[in-house]
């Protein structure tokens, strides 16, 4: 079973709308999460990381983390066509020095 | 930003062929990784290393060998390539095992 589950697999939002992406780990040893963004034909690039319970905001992007449920979510407000990409969630197990990536969510922002 | 380069960028080989994918990072990172990315599977870790001469097995190692010759260079070897190894391969590097990974541009491999 996939240890990092992302939902939805695909998401379509209109330009200016809010996109909400979810990620949950089934590994209780996970300490924190990363969010990567991968534009079509490009390599993944770090978008945001979150280490503590609560919320972290950077511009139009907000990440939430609930450590008890090992759930993180990424919210993009005022979505732009340039936000269209594959968003990858990664769970980090610091004891095992291990990182596990989810399958990703394909976000399409329609002009 | 951290620099990771990969070569070749595209490769076509036949079943049973020998393939070597190269990765170089110039960031003095200790850790280097090889992933494959396939539709429906996401990024899957093949092998990784935390220093020259070191090799650790990832999640999908079958059919792959790897070698870390220097801190900068990490190679992925497919000695008897099979069509199931057709994929997009990414190399990445990081300072430590829990630190941000920086990815190279990828190598697209087609095994006929």
Image (spheres, coloured by chain):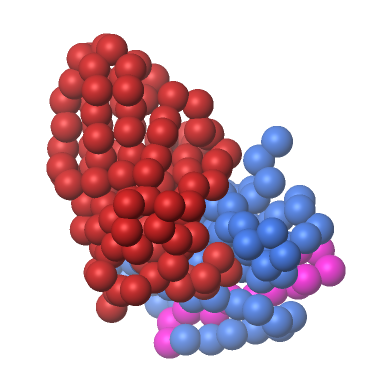
Q: Residue at x 44, y 67 (%)?
A: B30
Task: Name above or below for residue A30 compared with residue A11.
Answer: below
**B73 in magenta:** no
Whether residue A51 can be seen here = yes
Residue A70 % position (x, y)? 75, 63
Task: Name above or below for residue A70 compared with residue B43.
Answer: below
Q: Residue at x 16, y 32 (%)?
A: B11
Q: Which chain is blue?
A: A
Quadrant of residue B18 within the rendered picture: top left
Residue range corresponding to the magenta coloring: A59-71
| Residue closest to the far right | A68
**A66 in magenta:** yes
Query: In the displayed structure, does residue A90 sit left or right of residue B24?
Result: right
Q: Nearer the viewer, residue B94 or A38?
A: B94
Q: Quadrant of the C terminus of chain A?
A: bottom left
Q: Quadrant of the N terminus of chain A?
A: top right
Q: Nearer the viewer, residue A30 or A13?
A: A30
Query: In the displayed structure, does residue A59 sit left or right of residue A101?
Result: left
Q: Residue at x 34, y 74 (%)?
A: B28
Query: In the displayed structure, does residue A20 sit left or right of residue B29?
Result: right
Task: Name above or below for residue B53 compared with residue B65.
Answer: below
Q: Residue at x 42, y 30 (%)?
A: B64
Query: In the displayed structure, does residue B50 sit left or right of residue B71?
Result: right
Q: How many marks?
A: 0
Q: Nearer the viewer, residue B70 or B94?
A: B70
Q: Nearer the viewer, residue A75 or B87?
A: B87
Residue A32 % position (x, y)? 66, 70
Whether residue B101 can be seen here = no
Residue B9 % position (x, y)? 16, 44
Residue A6 % position (x, y)? 60, 51
Q: Which chain is red?
A: B
């Amino acid at each position: 079973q996939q240890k990092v589950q992302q939902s939805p697999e695909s998401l379509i939002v209109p330009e200016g709308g809010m996109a909400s992406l979810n990620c949950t780990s089934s590994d209780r040893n996970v300490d924190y999460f990363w969010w990567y963004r991968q534009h079509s034909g490009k390599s993944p690039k770090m978008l945001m990381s979150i280490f503590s319970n609560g919320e972290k905001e950077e511009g139009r992007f907000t990440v939430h983390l609930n450590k008890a449920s090992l759930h993180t979510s990424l919210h993009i407000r005022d979505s732009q066509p340039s936000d269209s990409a594959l968003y990858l969630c990664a769970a980090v197990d610091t004891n095992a020095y291990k990182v596990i990536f989810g399958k990703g969510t394909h976000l399409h922002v329609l002009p | 930003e951290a620099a990771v380069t990969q070569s070749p960028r595209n490769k076509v080989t036949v079943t049973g062929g020998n393939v070597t994918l190269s990765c170089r990072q110039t960031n003095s990172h200790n850790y280097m990784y090889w992933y494959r990315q396939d539709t429906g599977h996401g990024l899957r870790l093949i092998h990784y290393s935390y220093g020259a001469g070191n090799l650790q097995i990832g999640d999908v190692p079958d059919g792959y060998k790897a070698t870390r010759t220097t801190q900068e260079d990490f190679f992925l070897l497919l000695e008897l390539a099979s069509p199931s190894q057709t994929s997009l391969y990414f190399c990445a590097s990081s300072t430590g095992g829990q630190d941000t990974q920086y990815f190279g541009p990828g190598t697209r491999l087609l095994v006929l």
